Image (cartoon, rainbow, N blue to C red):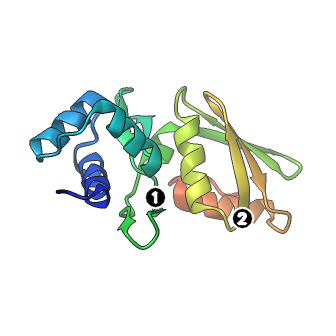
Amino acid sequence: MITKNRRLAIILELVNMHTPSSQGKLLKLLHDKGFAITQTTLSRDIKQLKISKIPDDKGNYIYTAPHQETISPGRVFIKDKVLPLSNRGFLSIEFSNNLGVIKTRPGYANGIASDIDNLASSAILGTIAGEKTVLLIPREEATRQDVLDILAKIIPGLRKEN
């Protein structure tokens, strides 16, 4: 019998290797690996693993796993992988006092907000994403330049203020 933790690890591996565009395709990949599960079980696993759908560079949606999150503490770890989404969807950033507003291509705001939430928590308290806009809420002690410096690591080519 294959354990649930093993199944979760295989799901992450398949998402990272094949970037399936639907649960049906992911389910077929799992069946090919010998897992006899239902789509309902797969849906629960996807939710537990915090796998989400994001647009790729062609505008199609694909499944992707979050960055370096622990699933079932001490058991399954998601590999750190680079998502170039931030580079492809980013258009501009402006500030109003300490709040930042990022403009993106339509459909990219959630993915970029997720990248920022996962990789910039030292300077950014959180984000709120719409369809093509991300509201950045910096930590109180973070300066605008701190925010831009950390975003430049996530969004290659971001112009820094002087």
Q: Dividing the image into 4 quarters, which one contains the C terminus? A: bottom right
Residue at figure coordinates x 71%, y 64% from the top left:
123
Most foreground residue, 144 or 45: 45
Whether tag 1 and tag 2 are in contact, CB under 8 A, the answer is no
Mark number for residue 83?
none
Q: Earlier in the sequence, mark 1 or mark 2?
A: 1
Residue 140 position in % (x across, y down): 86, 63
Report how far apart the C-alphas of labels 1 and 2 lie in the structure. 17 Å
Most foreground residue, 103 or 159: 103
The amino acid pointed to by label 2 is Ala
Residue 30 position in % (x across, y down): 19, 42
Residue 32 position in % (x across, y down): 10, 41
Q: Nearer the viewer, mark 1 or mark 2?
A: 1
Callout 2 crowding tier (Cα within 10 Å): few <14, some 14–19, many ≥20: many
Most foreground residue, 162 or 134: 134
The amino acid pointed to by label 1 is His
Image: 40 above or below 137: above
Mark number for residue 123?
2
Residue at figure coordinates x 32%, y 60% from the top left:
5
Secondary structure of the residue carrying tag 1 is loop
Residue at figure coordinates x 39%, y 26% from the top left:
59
Residue designated by label 1: 67
Give left or right: position of 136 versus 104. Answer: right
- Residue projecting furthest to the right: 97
Quarter assignment of residue 102: top right
Secondary structure of the residue carrying tag 2 is loop
Most foreground residue, 160 or 37: 37
